[in-house]
Amino acid sequence: CRREATCTAAGCRIGDVIRLERPESVTEVFLLRNEPVIEGNTICAGRIRIAPDRPMDSDIEEIPITDPRMARSFPGSLWRVRFSAPEGKEHRLGFWIRER
């Protein structure tokens, strides 16, 4: 796996190149503080947008904060966002993170 990150005035791009021995699906995970919504192939949360370079399946899961110490910093919930790529031996996954 190789990760690249670049930032410009347009936003930041995170890219991964993953080579596997056999074809498999790959899932990238982001953990967000603000409740996200799906707008087409883009996830919007708070003041940011996360958009994959190419269409991918995505899902959102709420993670309630139940630990009292953690709840002081993160009251309510965190949100897990998963982007899943179809099976392949090589994956080139890129995500743009931009201000809304």
Image: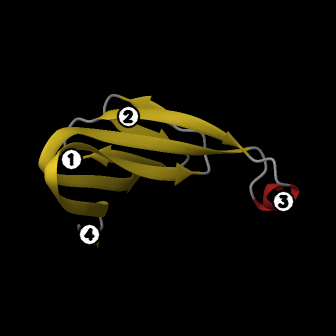
Q: Amino acid at mark 4?
A: Arg
Q: Which label belongs to residue 3?
A: 4
Q: Is residue 64 left or right of residue 30?
A: right
Q: Which residue is mark 2?
A: 58
Disc 2 from disc 1: Cα separation: 13 Å
Mark 1 / mark 3, whichever is N-terminal: 1
Q: Earlier in the sequence, mark 2 or mark 3?
A: 2
x and y, in percent, of residue 38 in the image:
43, 31
Most foreground residue, 30 or 21: 21
Is label 1 in contact with label 4 (beta carbons under 8 Å)?
no
Q: Is residue 100 visible?
A: no
Give the residue number, with chain letter if any, for mark 1. 53
Of the numbered discs 3 and 4, the one sitting upstream in the chain is 4
In the rendered view, would you say 9 is above or below 63?
below
Kind of element beneath mark 2: strand
On screen, residue 14 above or below 81: below
Q: How many marks?
A: 4
The quadrant of the picture occupied by the N terminus is bottom left
Q: Residue at x 58, y 43 (%)?
A: 79
Q: CA distance from mark 3 to mark 4?
A: 33 Å
Which of marks 4 and 1 precedes in the sequence?
4
> In terms of image quadrants, where is residue 73?
bottom right
Q: Which of the two marks, 2 or 1, is nearer to us in this view?
A: 2
What residue would you read off at disc 3?
A: 72
